[in-house]
Image (cartoon, rainbow, N blue to C red):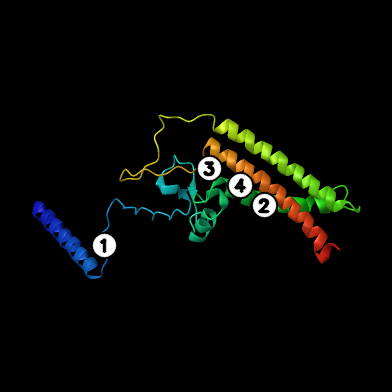
Amino acid sequence: ARAGGDMAAVRASARRGAAGRSLGAARGLAPRRGAVAARAAEPKAQVIKPINGDPFIGMLETPVTSAPAVANFLSNLPAYRTGVSPLLRGVEIGLTHGFLLAGPFIKLGPLRATDSAEVAGCLAGAGLVVILTTCLSIYGQATFQGVDEGAVGLKTLTGRSIDKDPLQSADGWANFTSGFLVGGLSGVAWAYACTQLLPYYA
C-alpha cells in the first residue's frame, strides 16, 4: 500500500510539472536551463586601417587620406604629376619656394628695421635656395647611384608594364634639381621686384 502511495505521489508530481511547463509555454516563458548562451558583440567599424588591407605597405588609410578631394589635390602636386617633365616640375616647386622664402627674411631678419631690409632678405632667401639645391643634389647622388638591370619593373595584373616615373632616376633628379635652382632664384627675384613695385612697400 505504501509503495502504491509513493507511485501515486510521483505521478501527481509529474502531472504538476507537465502542467507548469505547458502553462509557461502558453505565457511565452522559456523553460529554465542550466547554461546561458552569450551573444558575441557586434564588430566595430574600423575607421583607420592599412591601405588595401595590407599592413606591410606601411601606409594607413584614413577618412582624410582616402577622401577623393585629398587624393585629387595630392595627385595634382608637381612632385606627383608624372605627365610633366622633371625639369618643369623643379621650376614650379622652386618658384613657389623662392617667392615664399624671402618674406620671413625681410620681415624677421636682423636688418628688418633698416632701409636695406628687402635686399638683405632677398639675398638670404637666395642663399637658402642654393643650400636646398645642394641638399637635393646630395640626396640624388646617394639615392640614384646606379641602375639595376635585373630589377623587375611595375606591371598590372594583366602583365602590362607601367612606365616608371622619370623623376625617380639619376638624370630625372638632376633635371629636377636644376629646375629647382632656376625656379628658386627666379622666385626670389620676383619677390624683390614685388617689394619695389607694390604700393604696400613704398
Q: Secondary structure at mark 2?
A: helix
Please provide percent x and percent y for residue 107: 82, 54
The 10 Å Cα crowd at callout 1, few under 14, some 14 to 19, many 20 or more, is few
- Tell me: 170 left or right of 57: right
Along the line of sight, the residue nearer the viewer: 87 or 169 = 87
Residue at image location 63% in from the left, 42% down from the top: 178
- Of the image marks 3 and 1, the number of the one nearer the N terminus: 1
- Measure the alpha-carbon separation of dots 3 and 1: 72 Å
Identify the amino acid type marked 1: Ala
Q: Secondary structure at mark 1?
A: loop
Give the quarter of the image for residue 21: bottom left
| In front: label 3 or label 1 | 3
Tell me, yes or no, whether the two marked residues, 4 and 2, touch with CB atoms within 8 Å. Answer: no
Residue that mark 1 sits on: 30
- Tell me: 91 left or right of 83: right
Residue that mark 4 sits on: 90
Identify the amino acid type marked 3: Leu
> Image quadrant for the C terminus?
bottom right
Residue at image location 22% in from the left, 66% down from the top: 25
Identify the amino acid type marked 2: Leu
- Measure the alpha-carbon separation of dots 2 and 1: 78 Å
> Image quadrant for the N terminus?
bottom left
Residue that mark 3 sits on: 167
- Of the image marks 2 and 1, the number of the one nearer the N terminus: 1
The 10 Å Cα crowd at callout 3, few under 14, some 14 to 19, many 20 or more, is many
Residue that mark 2 sits on: 95
- Of the image marks 4 and 2, the number of the one nearer the N terminus: 4
- State whether residue 171 is above or below residue 31: above
- Of the image marks 3 and 4, the number of the one nearer the N terminus: 4
